[in-house]
Amino acid sequence: MAAQNPQAKYDANNTIAVKFKLNKKTDADIIEYLASMDNKQGTFKRLIREEIKRSRGN
């Protein structure tokens, strides 16, 4: 087996990738919004953390 580069090894041990599909017709508003954003990952994390906090009643 070939040796992993350091970034690939770090990613394998410390991260996951999440993927989802958007429909060009029914999700056009979301697609347009995402296209205008500089930091998509940060926005997703913030929104999810807000939802976690809200759902826990904090």
Image: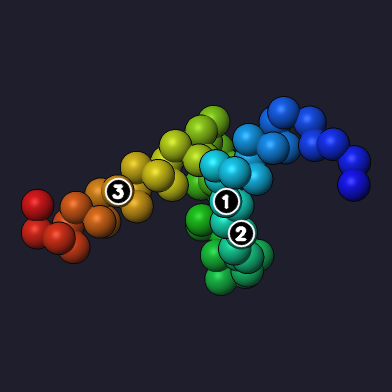
Earlier sequence position, callout 1 versus callout 3: 1
**Mark 1 residue element:** loop
Q: Is residue 12 left or right of residue 36?
A: right
**Mark 2 residue element:** loop
Label 2 close to label 1 by CB (< 8 Å)? no
Number of residues whose C-alpha sits closer than 10 Å to that of mark 3, classed few (under 14), some (14–19) or many (20 or more): few
Q: Residue 12, position in %: x, y? A: 65, 45
Q: Is residue 31 visible?
A: no
Per the image, the residue denoted by label 2 is 19
Q: Residue 24, position in %: x, y? A: 65, 65
Earlier sequence position, callout 2 versus callout 3: 2
Q: Give me the disc on residue 6.
A: none
For marks 2 and 3, give the CA distance.
18 Å
Q: Residue at x 51, y 46 (%)?
A: 33
Please tell me which residue lies in front, 8 or 23. Answer: 8
For marks 1 and 3, give the CA distance.
17 Å
Please tell me which residue lies in front, 48 or 27. Answer: 48
Per the image, the residue denoted by label 3 is 49
Q: Residue at x 34, y 48 (%)?
A: 47
- Residue type (three-letter) at the residue carrying disc 1: Ile
For marks 2 and 1, give the CA distance.
10 Å
Give the residue furthest to the left. Answer: 57
Q: Residue 9, position in %: x, y? A: 69, 37
Q: Is residue 15 depicted above or below 26 in this figure? A: above
Per the image, the residue denoted by label 1 is 16
- Residue type (three-letter) at the residue carrying disc 3: Arg
- Residue type (three-letter) at the residue carrying disc 2: Lys
Q: Is residue 42 visible?
A: yes
